[in-house]
Amino acid sequence: MSKPTISRRDFLGTAAATATLPVLLGTSRAAFALTPAAPYIPPQSERARLNLNLNWKFLRDDVAGAEAQALDDSQWATISTPHSFNDVDSFRKIISHSGGDLGTYKGLSWYRKHFKLPASYSGRKIFIEFEGMRQAGDIFLNGKPVGLYENGITAFGVDISGAVNFGSQENVLAVKVDNRTTYKERATGVNFEWNANDFNPDHGGINRHVWLHVTGKIHQTLPLYAGLETTGIYAHAANFDFAKRSADVTVDSEVRNSSGDRATVMLSVVVADPAGVVHAQFDGESVDMVDGEKTVLTATGALKAARFWSTVDPYLYNVYTILKVDGKVVDVETTTTGFRKAEFKGGAGSGGVYLNGKFVYLKGFAQRSSNEWAGLGQAYPDWIHDYTARLIRECHGNYVRWMHISPQKVDADALARFGIIQVCPAGDKERDVSGRQWDQRLEVMRDSMIYFRNNPSILFWEAGNTVVTVEHLQQMIEIRKQWDPNGQRVMGARGNDDAVLNTATTPIAEFYGVMIGQDPKTDSLAGPADMFRAYSAARRDRAPLIETEDFREEGARRFWDDYSPPYFQAKKGPNDTWRIRSEYLFTSESFALAGIKRYWEYWQNRISNSDAAHSKWSGYASIYFTDSDADGRQDSSEVCRVSGKLDAVRLPKQLYFAHRVMQNEQPDLHILGHWTYPEETAATPDVPAHKTAKTVYVVANTESVELWLNGKSLGVNSKPDTGYVFAFPDVTFVPGSLKAVGRNGSRVVAQQELTTAGQPAAIKLTLTVGPQGLQADGQDAAFIDFEVVDAKGQRCPTDDARVDFAITGPAIWRGGYNSGKIDTTNNLYLNTECGINRVSVRSTLSPGTISITATRAGLKSAQTQMVSKAVDLSDGLSTLKPQLLQAPA
């Protein structure tokens, strides 16, 4: 049996950039072009989308009458959205699995936005789109209520056409946000079950984008069922011919006539690639609409010379939908989407997920939908969301199962562009509910489905993060059939109760999500091989089995192994009891070894044609890609849940590199740990002083591994444990070079070398900004890696001490965090962990030069600079587009 194998690339293992030059993330993407023809330019129309994110006034308090247009808010803080007011107080307290108080502010706050609209917009339709907020918001315009947002998950639309001022008269949009977990739905007095800290970290505020949409009176609607009860555009494909690279594309566009008169309307569609080359162009039938009517127009045509979206080629098209009235263009909208054929099969040895006719094994992670970043909270620029998606891609993951609530649009879009399949839930708290709480879940699923159904990477809608009743699952399937009948997606749930998800004769789930190999009959943990036998033949034969959140152990990044100072032997870290080992406490080394073992148990059982009791595992998700400000199991030692493969500022643990190797389809290897140890391990009451010697573990997908120390071979291992772990026991530490060489047969296919670092000598800074540099929009951010290095510039991997920072210029310091230490975020000091850590700054609305200096007594200091660039902002409105990172070509 072949193993998944990727070329050696120690991503983020070392920092290569200089201390004074930023890493500019993102370049222009090579386009696929058929001919050198001029790129397609859509016709002009009355439609416009304006950025409403910049220059809000904010107060983290309740003020009577704060909705009034004339209120003096000049002394309030100036912020930009997306904004999470918990960037200053998250990741600062020890947390526990019981949830409880994560230390973040919970209460009322106010946002106020001043803006003017051109007189030329008078007579048009004006909508505001909130991509989301946490948890609820009373929305006012010019002192009058215009909307109430409550569910804390979905996007929300407000029609302000009849309430907005035009010309020189100012508008004030005011939003009172309530992120208390005690919030109850106004109309019913029922709380939203997912409004809880443990499963949905409460990073409150308007924590997603805000847009202003302008259309004509006859227009295509927005996909904002919440608030507007409109469904927007739905693009889908059928009749795929992969040999001829063709498919039939259908576009359904909901149109509203608010003109005051009857109108004859027609929909035209142009599908163009990123270079503007047209691959399809077709018209629908003319339709007569009376005033006030809302209807769906449809057009179908052939897509030629197509590239179909997949995990290896996440190709996206721009679909231009052109609305004409009596032959005149009145509205043009652009939808970015991809086309793919998805199939979901059951059956032993042949079941699974298929894209474009090819089996795809899902390999990846479960992740909290808050996807927060220590020091920045939940709200940070789009390109940093892309950065996380790129890290998943860099370790060859192709699958993310979002947990409990629907993802943020910025994350859903990022995963689509990076070729990562998604599971999209609605909202829950790991239980089935009834009455109004169940209706709330149905409504969120509907609204999320309408909002995300053009996203090609979402293949699964999840009815619950645990089992639901047959009746409830049937209701969720009916929603899929009503609102996403042609999207080639399936509905299921995460749960292991065979009796609930199936009747004796009629299994109804369209996929089956499982969790940590739990035997539904005994409620005990079992290996993945045993789990196959826990599912009925009817269930296996109907739909794919997918692991949705396995490996719940925790391991902080700061612990290398039992031999590495400063955390080794019996010495404890601050606020830490890690040496009192519970089942969830690991070093980085043991965390990686345990994670590898679990991954291998699934991988080796993914196909077993010889055993009818086995079905093909369709996918594997290890729980948490990044550490999260959520429910942790190390009740007395950690400020966050440290199950991530990366920490909360996206610095990798050793398990990240192990996943990179295991998920690779090319030869790859990684030496766990470092090669800078004390030559002698100090004595303890039980053990005398002795030479430091340890087992060296090499994670590889090659046939054999040879280990070399200072040019001398320590032997060849061709019998890996748990599929990937090549162990070399009792290696006595000697300063110098430790090298692992992976071979397939006699051919060297992968290698890595570690060298011993000298004494700490200097601090090194590496600056990372977005592809266009730091934007002075009040929301953009930059992060700075700080390392302690020796005289040769090599990172000192056991350094763990304080570094102090100074900052000048127009930026807000957001700092970073130390796992296992309270109150570390947002301070002008931070410890390294394993020789490196990461801090962040956020821009303001003022452009200028920002300087950051890092110092520690006895080390050479370091400085880095960046320039915050001015952005367009006029009368409170902007055309600024979010920065995005380059997706795979």
Image (cartoon, rainbow, N blue to C red):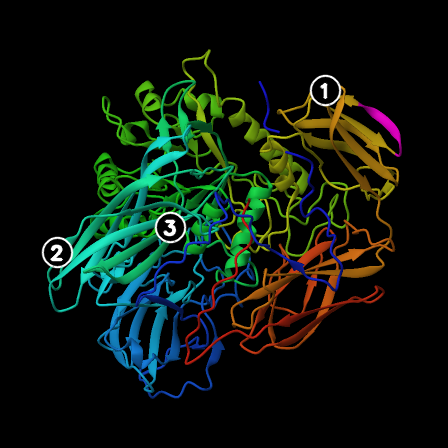
Q: Give residue 801's position: percent from left, percent from top.
A: 75, 59
The residue to which callout 1 is attached is: 718
View extreme (top): residue: 610
Mark 2 falls on what kind of element? strand
- What's under tag 1, amino acid-wise? Ser
* CA–CA distance in space, label 1 to label 2: 73 Å
How far across and how far down the image is residue 606, in percent?
Answer: 49, 23
- On-image quarter of the N terminus: top right
Mark number, residue 406: 3
* Left or right placement of residue 56 versus residue 720 in this view: left
Q: Identity of the amino acid at label 3?
A: Ser
- The three-letter amino acid code for the residue at tag 2 is Asp
**What secondary structure is found at the residue carrying circle 3?**
loop
Question: Is 714 part of what is drawn in magenta?
Answer: yes
Task: Give the mark toward the camera: 3 or 2.
Answer: 2
Question: Which structural element holds mark 1?
Answer: loop
Span colored in magenta: 710-715
- Mark 3 and mark 2 lie on one chain; the one further toward the N terminus is 2
Badge 3: how crowded within 10 Å, few (<14), some, or many (20+)?
Answer: many
- The earlier-in-sequence mark between 3 and 1 is 3
In this orientation, which residue lies closer to the viewer: 94 or 509? 509
Evaluate whether residue 635 shows in this view: no
- Front one among 620 and 555: 620
How far from the left and from the top, in percent, is residue 385? 52, 55
Q: Which residue is depicted at the point 40% across and 67% down?
A: 206
Q: In the shown orientation, is residue 823 left or right of residue 589?
A: left
To which residue does mark 2 refer?
288
